[in-house]
Amino acid sequence: METPLTAKIRPDGEMIDLAAYERAGGYQAARKAMRMAPAEITELVKKSTLRGRGGAGFPTGQKWSFVPLGPAAPRPKYLIANADEMEPGTFKDRVLLEGDPHELIEGMIVAARAIEAERGYIFLRGEYTDAAARLSRALAEASAKGYLGRNVFGSGADFDLRLHLSGGRYMCGEETGLLNALEGKRANPRAKPPFPQVSGLFGKPSIVQNVETLCNLPHILDKGADWFVKLGLTGDGGTKLYGASGKVKKPGCWELPMGTPLRELLERYAGGMRDGVRFRGVLPGGASTDFLTADHLDVPMDFTAVAKAGSRLGTGTMIVLDDKTCPVGMVHNLEHFFAQESCGWCTPCWSGLHWAEEILWAIESGRGTPADFDRLDHVTKMCGPGNTFCALAPGAVEPLQSALKYFREDFERHIREKRCPWRNGQ
Amino acid sequence: MKIVVDKKEYEVDPRENLLEACLGRGLDLPYFCWHPAMGSVGACRQCAVKVYRDENDARGRIVMACMTPITPNLLASIDDAEAREFRAGIVEGLMESHPHDCPVCDEGGECHLQDMTVMTGHNYRRFEFPKRTFHNQYLGPLLNHEMNRCIQCYRCTRFYTEYAGGKDFAVLKLRHLVYFGRAEAGVLENEFSGNLVEVCPTGVFTDKTLKRHYTRKWDLQMAPTVCAHCALGCNVTAGERYGTLRRIVNRYNGQINGYFLCDRGRFGYEHVNSPKRIRSARARRDAGAAEIPKAEALDRFSSLAAGGKTLGIGSPRASLESNFALRALVGPENFYAGVSDASYDLLAAMLQVLRQGPAPASLRQIEHGDAALVLGEDVTNSAPRLALTLRQTIRQAGLEQAEKMRVPRWQDHAVRELAQKDHGPLFIATPYPTRLDDVATETYRAAPDDIARLGFAVAHLLDPASPAVPDLAEPLRALAGRIADTLQAAARPVVVSGTGAGSAAVLRAAADVARALAKAGKPVAFSLQAEERNSLGFAMMEPKPLGRAVDAARAGEVQTVIVLENDLYRRAPAAAIDALLAAPHVVALDALETRTTAKAELVIPAAPFAEADGTVVSSEGRAQRFFRVYPPAGGVQDSWRWLADVLGLLARPEGLAWKDLDDVVEAVARAFPSLARIRDAAPGAGFRIAGAKIPREPHRYSGRTSMLANIQVSEPKPPEDPDSALSYTMEGAPVEPPAALLPFFWTGGWNSIQAVNKFQEEIAGPLRGGDAGVRLLDQAAGGAGTLARAPDGSASVPVAGYLDSVPAPFAPRRGEWLIVPRHHIFGSEELSAEAPAIAELSPQPYVALGPSDAAALGAAPGAVVNVKSEAGSASLPLRVEPGLPAGLAALPAGLGPLAGIPLPVWGRIELGR
């Protein structure tokens, strides 16, 4: 089984430095990219079927194709790595950032070539201090070698790449919120259209791309689109960094073929449930995805199949709910997070998530009423896709709406008994 | 373009969004964050509608109308049940923490949030948790802050920071706890902060001056009037109850103020309620002044007016009618300008320039310009609303860029994100730094003569036929080159100047630039700012210069001086005015006590703007009628009526002929062909709708039968208004009057000022039937500005070329400074300075020097220095003004002991002891 993304990562937890990275074949893809025409790279990436690993799963090559190219295009153009990994339960990009920062830098050189970007930023979650130190070192190494800055690899093209540490909001992970934050503004989302490809950072054409997505690029250039497609078990190409947290025996993060079934992840890689607890459900792709239950364990973890099962692949890092954990409490915790992270821009989000949090806490602390179901349904409906300004609220209500569906009896019991059965002993 | 809304076809403008299209066609669709002047941002989600792919699409999808562009055959539904439910849900969300304090909220009864809540049908509270609460801030004397009412629509910050360029206000915090305010409590710095009262859809920002004498909108008697505090002619609605003026709100005029006013215009009204008001006639007796009855006042007035050589001193703040009545009483040969001779020359020059063309531009034209040159004028302080307009002018480049990238103009944040800080060109040349400098492409700080030289140099580069500027220093030549190139490249250049710098050369230079651009075929927006409400109209009545009146008085040729609505001590040095008012008899007509009325043996109580009718001419050459808000109490009446009464007592034909305002208007129009069109400024007193006058009181006016019951139990007959088509009642036909007679914006379900949508031909377009006012100087500018009508109005003749002489470069003098006027939005204008809230914001008198000159003088900021000039002397604290060039000093215009000296003037400044 091939693990191109993580193959170079050292087992001792130290980062792989430039010399070792190059010895292992690093920066050959970047060199190759510099000899290719931008459109040629985009075509290759389109053919590879690479889809964004940040959660939305948008085809990467297609995303790039909206960037204006050539001498008439507005300048400068920007490439931004979204390394603001803020999704609860998600820690996959961190593995790459800390273990193999050169892979990200090389991926960015490739992407920058494809869209003719001369400036780049790595927008890093502020709490990732180890990653920040390693990226700084890697950037210095690459710059010293002339792989970044002016005349990259003697190609004549410039690529000035800088690290930016986020002040820290969930909204900074939303690509347009990120752009505003990078401009020094509130991390509020922007209206689309216009899309960042046309009017992004500082009003210039920009691509914002997840770390894992960018890290795939050197390998696609090295080994080709067909190889990449074949890495996946189902239609979606490549490998995927999957993760698991919750009361499983071996929480962790693994690079596996795209489309690895949920059951295999849970039982083989996460080692199954801890002794004494039983599986009740799972948020398959991070906190902002719908619950799946035991009925869904055979779902292949790719974009299409998870969507068909009623959830989203998201970041591919699951949070497992067990029978000794109160689902109402869990959902309250999540909604507390999302309500807190609402930027306060659009009404359904700031008012709805606040309301949901209040109701859930009321239910959890024994003050719920049967009318709360209607109200929670109402909030999830108000926060549905298209009703809000960005994707935060629709994602935020996904665990809530699915919990209401799959764990309704737990909510009812809270209301009936006027207490949390888990909190006060069963 | 054709669209279908709820199965009905509408023809709409494809440049609109769906919300604008719906509102513009008279449909009701609730909204909060969208603003007609500020566009869409999609925050509140209140204007949700359903759109359908085609006729076969039964489900449709919810979209925000404000963010939806018009596409051919767009199918939409406002009435769809799901959309309605969603909109009610949004209001429910907004109401989570909104206090139920409508009965004690100043916004109650004219609250957009109330209106929209009723419109959506949301009634019963389901949110049962504690409401979030905030600490409010002290924001200065103009605005109240009650953040608990906030619904997070972001309009305030969008207006204050993005539209008006304010820097001391921001969005703070997150989620349902977003806070709109300052980093810490304190006076709001922006000159347009008062618009938050109307921009805020609910009661977060309310009018603090109104709160002191609070009255609900429905209890206000209201009338359309024209702002009294500068020459722009912004349209305002004034409201009264129990004989006091309660507040000013914006009265939309698509050509002038649009949706916004400046703070001087909104809060300066309280001079009308001042304790200095003259409410009855007074005659000076041995021991002082005593009130006299109206009949006695008229007797005395008429016998003084008939008793020998009588001079009339008119006023740029009085109406055309009042000035004309004075002129009629004393005769044209004895009618003098109540302004300094320097101002007189400036006004004459301005009028001449405007008559030669290009014709003066409206604020709307200026807003749509794409490159601007401001020559000599500190517009933020002299014509404040124009500064707000210029902040939009520089956005045109970004808006056009956005359109090219198919981002619609109304998509406000997308346009701003695209444009970032790349705004269109704005060049500002003024003697001292101005509040617009933050968005200027380049600024130039110099003495008025050098500013004029820059202007002439630009004109010469644009058209070599205009006079060349000799001895132009290289940096100035280069700057002139950049300005000329920019204006040349612009599609719609803007040239702004005015009388503010006190230099005729400056405004002639501006005119040459405008003329050169017009000659090149550019649709130049040319604007000269005069100082006062009716400066231009007054100048059109051809008064004689004040200096000659002073000379005549000094020569003992004068028996009586009649001063109309004017404190002459603000106009000229005290010695000259003392000499003039030393005439045997002085009659003063005014609304407030001044140093001039103190000198008069007979003081006549004139009606201030809110109690008077008349016509004024703005800097745009737009004649506009203003109307009494309420009948003045006691002996107060319009100056023109006092004068007409005197003419009547003297059995003069005018006095016998003039029965009402329309008669005086007619007389003015006949006497001055250039003012003939003022007849059309508004419908006359005979205008009726369905046989009825237009009520000044809204349909919900309360207490009518009881408000005077403590005096008399039976309801008195409403006062008559012989002078206008407005009545002092609440009875009238429920039909929309013409714009000039609109007493308030109010329509079914739309109780707040947002109701203006319902009175426009299209959103942000003209009011139905056309915006108020008539332009008087249009015919002067035939063709592309190269032809002008002769001064007598007889025939078209070519513009008289460029005859101006270019001044020599400014030469600083040793031990002397050229003292220039520095204008202050709060304090420089006479009437508003009497309003307590404005007075609180006014600076103390001072003299300003640049840092190097102050250092050379050895004076620290605040040190008392002696300012000495031929025209007057005073000891004043020193203000150090960075940016003021060496050799220049500045005195606050209209403020302090030297308010009367005409500036600029050379003077000495010495360290005080």
Image (cartoon, coloured by chain):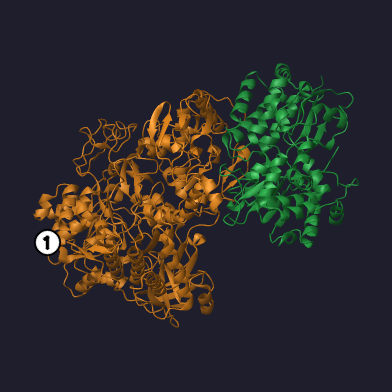
Residue A360, placed above or below residue B861: above
Q: Quadrant of the N terminus of chain B?
A: top left
**Count of all numbered marks drawn on residues in the image:** 1
Q: Colour of chain A?
A: green
Q: Can the viewer see residue B443?
A: yes
Quadrant of res A257: top right
Residue B569, placed above or below residue A111: below
Residue drawn at (50%, 42%) of the image: B40
The foreground one among B392 and A107 is: A107
Say which chain tag 1 marks: B
For this orientation, the residue located farthest to the bottom is: B814
For this orientation, the residue located farthest to the right is: A12
Residue B861, placed above or below residue B153: below
Residue type pointed to by label 1: Ala
Q: Give the labeled residue for mark 1.
A: B306
Whether residue B706 sits left or right of residue B479 in the image: it is left
Q: Which chain is orange?
A: B
Whether residue A62 sits left or right of residue B112 in the image: it is right
Residue B97: percent from left, percent from top: 57, 33
Residue B607, placed above or below residue B125: below
